[in-house]
Image (cartoon, coloured by chain):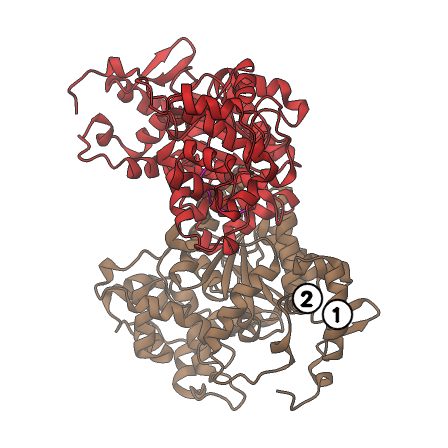
Chain colours: A red, B brown
Amino acid sequence: MSERSGLDEDMAQGLSEVPTSDGLAGPAVRRARAWLSRAAEPGSVAFWRFVEDAGPVEAVRRLRAGRAPDAVRALVGARAGQDASLTDLLRAERCGARLVVPEDDEWPAHLLHCLTLATGEEPDDPRHHSPRTTAPVPPLALWIRGAARLDELADRSVALVGARASTAYGEHVAGELGHQLGERGWTVVSGGAFGIDAAAHRGALAADAATVAVLACGVDRPYPAAHGALFHRIAESGLLVSEWPPGAAPHKHRFLVRNRLIAALTRGTVVVEAAARSGAQATARRAHRLGRQVMVVPGPVTSAMSVGCHELLREAELAAVLVTNAAQVVELVGRLGEDLADPPERPSGPRDELSDLAVRVLDACPVRNGVSPERLARVAGCDVLDVLRVLPALELADLVEVTDAGWRLARPGRTGEGRG
Amino acid sequence: MSERSGLDEDMAQGLSEVPTSDGLAGPAVRRARAWLSRAAEPGSVAFWRFVEDAGPVEAVRRLRAGRAPDAVRALVGARAGQDASLTDLLRAERCGARLVVPEDDEWPAHLLHCLTLATGEEPDDPRHHSPRTTAPVPPLALWIRGAARLDELADRSVALVGARASTAYGEHVAGELGHQLGERGWTVVSGGAFGIDAAAHRGALAADAATVAVLACGVDRPYPAAHGALFHRIAESGLLVSEWPPGAAPHKHRFLVRNRLIAALTRGTVVVEAAARSGAQATARRAHRLGRQVMVVPGPVTSAMSVGCHELLREAELAAVLVTNAAQVVELVGRLGEDLADPPERPSGPRDELSDLAVRVLDACPVRNGVSPERLARVAGCDVLDVLRVLPALELADLVEVTDAGWRLARPGRTGEGRG
């Protein structure tokens, strides 16, 4: 039906579907998912189920041969006869990007499983599926720019979302949260927009921490253009992530489709500033429906940019928790993380014998760059005298260490084995 | 044992304990409670139970004759032999005040019942009673300055409490809340301190509404002195209330004892600004223990004066609700008020057929002075176009009327009888 192309020949003859020994999907699978990522807009329940059932390589074959169900073929249309998969993969490589697919070890399967579960509740009849902009469908593949591993960053990550038209207050708080989370070894995940998104990334970068921007366009085509330098810095230490292939334009509906990934890829979502009926509110509600903790930073009741935050905090069914600093965020998502990991029998360590205050100070200590007791006090939400009082005990217990720059967590190697 | 005085003779011979036909306690009862109010500091479970069991007149007789239990006699000490009851009553009269006692119709028995219930849970042994500063004991009598009836004002009242060292933000919000509550016919109850207390009273006064200041000193001795003019204005349209007799000094512990009355005399407590570990937090927690709704206005997380507010909102067991305007406050306490009143079969009126929006606009209309549609929109939390859209229907339903100053609730007389 469609003319034979390089893709079909490659898949039929040369490319293997067998995973490699280093945890990577086979070349045929990657090529097929590259093709699929351009063939249909993400967010379709029917399309995802079709690929899931047939497998990516067979799904491509059927679509190109016109042998897919009508509902699925309609989503692809004339693109069934086109193939830019090799071009896309090469174009990604040229900008330091790659395609991560569910068959790779790096795929954050554990976190994205909530989308699979939610999709399972969609009805059978495609006519009654959730619209693409709100459907909880897993991504078919992720274009990723940056050297870090997505699964590792996402495993200890928090979404920081909020208004584009943010105030100086909101940007200050988002920057502080990004910085404090970064100091504690947590990855910030956000969009790439002006306002809260950018402030959160900048805060994390200032702490020399990895940060992840989930985009609604190609990872080689940063939007907004004014954030070119910011995206470059993010890709250096963290990741740019997108469901859309290189060159894809940031259409408005794509931001709504994208929002589910920000919610799903993180342990919880923090809303810093949000207007009434705003996108940040929508992201928070999606996070809640995916079983993620929603956290909200309040603001002045006189600020239009905090109206949406206060609305979220007043929605009882959302169970959103008011947070004012990173310690409170980590307390919530860290515990959830532990719950999910379900450590069978955690041996008791020196930490278990600490006072509440000492635990707060310990949690305030950054992983990498040492900080002053004043900063620890601010992050831990206690008096600097309290900090000075508990630091010696923490040091004696090999939990913290002092560097030229100040206090930080002790390196695991130094704390001595066999303690637990 | 004690020398005979005017009090004993008056009670033995002239003063009647029989209530008058206009709902007032008999003169002997009032005189006895005046004496008791000076004889012991409020807040003692043992003392209140002794008076409750013996009745006020007999309690005075026994105390003066040295026939009271040791624990109770110890609380009175040498004051058993003194009597300033007549002087106190005359001194109150001279400043436009009076003593309201539980035997008067005006006593807000319904609201104060929560204190009686809570006192019932105190142990029998006086050595194990809650300390005076936190015991939930009903007052023995209330010195009241102002012409309004306490029970009527308290029936539709909200406590507005907060920091003395408030910020311009907090004062603005407290003033707006006081004003909006006053416009809707709700009475503001607060202390008399600088900061949030004063801003709340001033807001209510600016709406020509009654406001109640519960003091920790004599009602003829306003504290702080700089609030002399404010207290004078409060007494003109509202009430100054105190458990302590005229001339009593504002000792520090008396504010803690007083706080239970602010919580008990109102349908709910709104905290506007509060530092960490502050008195306003303590009042909020007391309100919760007395079964009252706790409401909290958030603020910038960068403000030390909002730290206490955010702490309250994070205490799950307190079930505090975040509020940003008077409409949200009235929605909470108004409903509670109705629940308490428990109207057996409320007839359905024109109000029941209104849209949510129309109800919000209706609730935003002041009782007395008309206001602009812009103000209604702000109070109702909706667009001014929405307000203009629903006002004609509300006017046709005889629920609102327009005056030279703007829109207000229609007077009951005009809405026509027999509708419900």
The magenta segment is A134-140
Question: Tags 1 and 2 in contact by the CB under 8 Å rule?
Answer: yes
Q: What SS does tag 1 mark? A: helix
- Assess disc 2: are there few (<14), some (14-19) or many (≥20) residues with their C-alpha within 10 Å of its C-alpha: many
**Where B254 sits versus B395, above or below?**
above
Q: Tell me the residue at 29%/39% (across/down).
A: A339
- Mark 2, chain letter? B
- Comes first in the chain, label 1 or label 2: 2
Decide: is B268 above or below B397: above
Query: Could you tell me which residue is drawn at 40 percent across and 46 percent down?
Result: A291
Q: Residue furthest left?
A: A418
- C-alpha span from label 1 to label 2: 8 Å
**Which residue, given by chain and number where applicable, does mark 2 sit on?**
B361
Question: Residue B153, located in which quarter of the rendered image?
Answer: bottom right
Residue A359: image location, x then y, percent = 31, 30
For badge 2, the amino acid type reads Val
**Quadrant showing the N terminus of chain B:** bottom left
Count of numbered marks: 2
Q: Are marks 1 and 2 on the same chain?
A: yes
Residue B391, labelled with which disc?
Answer: 1
Of the residues shown, which amino acid type is indicated by label 1? Leu
Nearest to the observer: residue A352 or residue A243: A243
Q: Residue at x 43, y 19 (%)?
A: A148
Query: Within the image, what quadrant is residue A165 found in?
Result: top right
Q: Position of residue A163 (x, y in %)?
A: 61, 38
State yes or no: residue A139 in magenta.
yes
In the rendered image, the vertical position of residue B150 relative to residue A334, given as above or below: below
